[in-house]
Amino acid sequence: MHKAAGKLLVIVALAPLATLAPAQTGDQPHQMTPAQKAEMEAYMKAGTPGAPHQALASAAGSYDLKVRSWHDPAGPAMEDAGTATRTMTLDGRVLVEDVSSSMMGSPFTGHGMMGYDNVTGKYWSTWNDTMSTGLMVSEGTCDPQGKTCTFTGGWNDPVKKTRVKARMTTRWTSPTTEIFDMYGPGKDGKEMKMMEITYTKK
């Protein structure tokens, strides 16, 4: 199903440019109109990795993780350790992250992807793990210095059957250390810090 969807996307994207192919009768290739040239340039620009993708690539590698999580803002944090591996895929367009840790005494694995959309000018992120069958999707921006990134997204609450909104920040305290914080609504509905993960690059 994924392959079929991918093929359909390519067909839809390139269909307007199909008339640019050389005629089969031996005629000279059609000259592109200004509008067709602009359209082709837009597609090329949208699909070409740039500086944001190079920044993502710099995060590739292996990490040790220190995980702290809270269910009550006034209570103590639960602490776990883990590891993460990050690799670039799709010819330098997407950063893939695989996490192995524990959560509430049980083995935990997670899989995330992060990229930068040249069209929207924003970063995007997806996340799946062994505590859910759902997909978390978020979008965000980074400061010009690349020291702090802020994302917003959410997931589906299995109890209330409603969408839970979340805010995530990532900040780099050194070239090899980054801290990820996730905030969401507490029992009183007010935002609270739910998780903190310290990544230390090996």
Image (tube, rainbow, N blue to C red):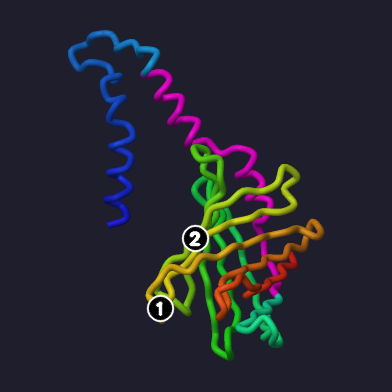
Q: Which residue lies most toward the top here?
A: 28
Mark 2 vs 1: CB contact within 8 A: no
Percent x, y of residue 8: 27, 44
Residue 36 in which image quadrant: top left
Helix, strand or loop for disc 2 = strand
Q: According to the image, label 2 marks what residue?
A: 126
Whole-percent x, y for residue 115 in the image: 54, 50
Tally of numbered discs = 2
Q: How many residues crowd mark 1 within 10 Å: few (<14), some (14–19), many (20+)?
A: few
Instruction: Give the numbered dot on residue 160.
Output: 1
Point 64% across, 50% down: residue:
57
Q: Residue 56 lies in magenta, yes or no? A: yes
Kindly report which numbered mark, 2 or 1, lies closer to the viewer in this rendering.
1
Relative side of 101 to 131, left or right: right
Helix or strand or loop: what does disc 1 sit on? loop
Quadrant containing the C terminus in the rendered view:
bottom right
